[in-house]
Amino acid sequence: MNKVVKGLLIGAISIFVLTGCTFGPKPTDTVSKFLKDVQKSDLKGASTLVQHSKDDVLNSFTDSKDSKDAIDANTLFKAITKGYTFEKPTLVSQNGDTAKVKVKITSVDVATAMGKAMEASFKNAFANAFSEDQKQADKDNQAFMEKEFLKNLNAKDAKMSTRTETLSLKKDKHGDWKLVSDKALENTVEANASKLDQLSQTQQPN
């Protein structure tokens, strides 16, 4: 009897080693945790699940000490994640220390909100085009646009956007799955975030 038990144990251990099974979180678990943190506007929690880099998607929501924005980053993050919903993530592929997970998300369309804010700011700027202190007028208009953006995000009739993103993940040195900060992750947090670059270019002087 002891030989039978011993044989079963050895066999189980062999399968465990050969298949590389672990009891740690799956890639889909990491994505679910990240999305739940975003849903709760938990910027700190969400940040722990992303690979850190200078282009980290969530860095834009961190106020610098010399920030001159009219709206603090935390308030903006809460507005963007208001009404945030998602479906159960599904594993697309997993190869060693890399994986891809697909998820469907619905949240406020930041590009539409910003587009309306820019339109309002253009009208405001025109109204103040002959200000004696143009430098101050420009600062005031920038603050006006930021407040309009926030108002549009929080509006009851704010346009919502549903999209499906495929997120990339990599294991860190501790063997934990972390989300790769890329365009897919950016669009996961901010609906149509990729269109913001196009909008900002329209503001640039020729």
Image: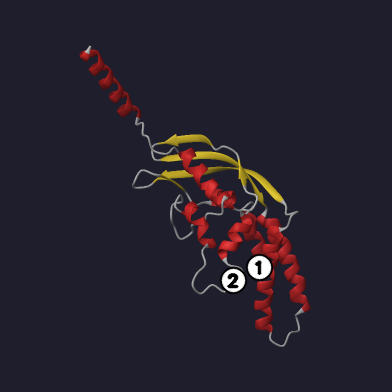
Label 1 vs 2, first from the N-terminus: 2
Task: Report if the CB atoms under discs 1 and 2 are less than 8 Å apart.
Answer: yes
> Taking 148 as reference, is 83 above or below it?
above
206 left or right of 179? right
In the rendered image, the residue lying farthest to the front is 1
Residue at 52% across, 54% down: 42
Q: Residues within 10 Å of mark 2 (few under 14, many from 20)?
A: some
Q: Which mark is residue 146?
A: 1
For badge 1, the amino acid type reads: Glu
**Residue drawn 69% across the image and 72% down it:** 144
- In the figure, 13 relative to 177: above or below? above
Q: Is residue 114 visible?
A: yes
Image: 86 above or below 6: below
Task: Name, please, the residue furthest toward the bottom.
Answer: 132
Circle 2 SS class: loop
Query: Quarter of the image containing the N terminus?
Result: top left
Marks 1 and 2, how far apart in space? 8 Å
Image x and y of residue 141, in percent: 69, 75
**Quarter of the C terminus within the rendering:** bottom right
* Residue 136 image point, x, y percent: 66, 82
Q: Give the residue type at disc 2.
A: Asp
Q: Secondary structure at mark 1?
A: helix
Q: Residue at x 62, y 60 (%)?
A: 197
Name the residue that disc number 2 marks. 69
Instruction: Name the one closer to the observer, 51 or 158.
Output: 158
- Left or right position of 97 against 165: left
Residue 176 image-quadrant placement = top left
Q: Is residue 76 left or right of residue 167?
A: right
Residue 206 seen by the camera? no
Q: Residues within 10 Å of mark 1 (few under 14, many from 20)?
A: some
Residue 38, given in percent of the width and then of the height, sits at 55, 51
